[in-house]
Amino acid sequence: MRMTLATTIMKPPSATGTDEYIAITRDFLLKDDQYLNFDIYGSINSFSKEEPILLACKDSAITNLKMAIANNQFGQFYIKKRDEGKFNLFLETTLQNVLTNRDATLEKKATVLYTCAKNAVTDVFNNPRSGKNVARVQNIAEGILRLIMNNASSASVLAKLCAHDFYTFTHSVNVCVFGISFWKMLGFGGNDKALQDFAVGCLLHDIGKSQISKNILKKPGRLNKEETKVVRKHPELGFSLMEEYLSQISLNIILYHHERFDGTGYPKARVMQDIPIEAKIASIADVYDALTTHRPYAGAQKPFDALKVMLEEMEGHFDQEQLVAFIRLLGGESAA
Ligand SMILES: [Fe+2]
């Protein structure tokens, strides 16, 4: 499921299908030196019955739009529905500017970021061998970090956007948001590169599932022995897929996020002291998000109930001290 940043509006009389106009936010048309690869239209406001007017065409520079923005004649900008994918990619390339734009609200920034994140992660899952898609995810990780590190309330704004339906890609973004907040709380904030690698690892922790049949991943009931064996291959599959692209920290998350404190995890059955810290942090965020979202085989639990399950029924899975810290983190967030 691809997310959109634009809203479909009522069709003007002449427009049909991919010719429909969709409203876009103009706050993010920022970088003067960028060229558009789609047409932009404008109207006085979103209630106008008139067909929107072409303001800037494909291959023109953003600068041309500045006048239209400045004279305030056009309150609402549009693109054609067929250009929606191009528009979302355009936002992705200008993402770091979007996030530092003083005129945009935190909610708008978080929405753009979350949407770009889902689209990029979806694409890397569909085509994990594309270095270009991996680079897009790295750009997204930088964006998520930038927003969370620069704005105290951004993590909870992002967390509110976290989808409640379980798809591997939305789950990956959620784990990244929870994981970064948790990492920050535990005080590992010093090294930017490490945190960036941690964020990338969280976004791609389940990338190995891209190699597993959807029939198994989406099976509504319990998995049989053979299917469980197949699913449990995803950490190693992910590791070999990403080995040439990612750092050790990111790879550790992919390979070890199903290891458990007491050595009952997979694929290596490592015990506490042999599990890299980044994988331990990611695994708490991973299990929490899985329990609190609706999955094909289980309903969503309330945050309190999920934490209770992790504390009481999953004894030996996590570092108890870290789990208590995570509970405190979520308690603080819901109180904020
Ligand atoms: Fe996993």
Image: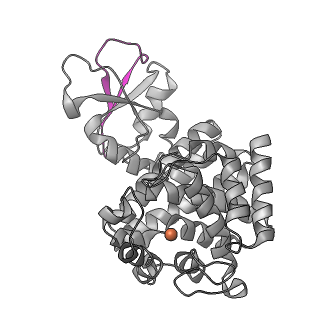
Viewer-side residue, 15 vs 54? 15
Name the residue: 53% across, 49% down. 113
Viewer-side residue, 81 vs 227? 227
- In the image, residue 223 sits, relative to residue 304, either above or below, namely below
Residue 42: percent from left, percent from top: 37, 24
Q: Identify the colour scheme used.
A: one colour
Q: Is residue 36 at all visible to an observer of this figure? A: no
Quadrant of the image occupied by residue 77 = top left
Q: Is residue 53 at all visible to an observer of this figure? A: yes
- In the image, residue 321 sits, relative to residue 185, either above or below, namely below
Name the residue: 64% across, 45% down. 302
Viewer-side residue, 308 vs 205? 308
Task: Tally the marks.
Answer: 0
Which portion, as a residue range, is magenta? 36-55
- In the image, residue 323 sits, relative to residue 151, either above or below, namely below
Residue 54: percent from left, percent from top: 30, 27
Can residue 41 be found in the magenta stretch? yes
Residue 5: percent from left, percent from top: 44, 39
Q: Quadrant of the C terminus?
A: top right
Q: Is residue 77 left or right of residue 255?
A: left
Can residue 134 be found in the magenta stretch? no
Viewer-side residue, 241 vs 100? 241
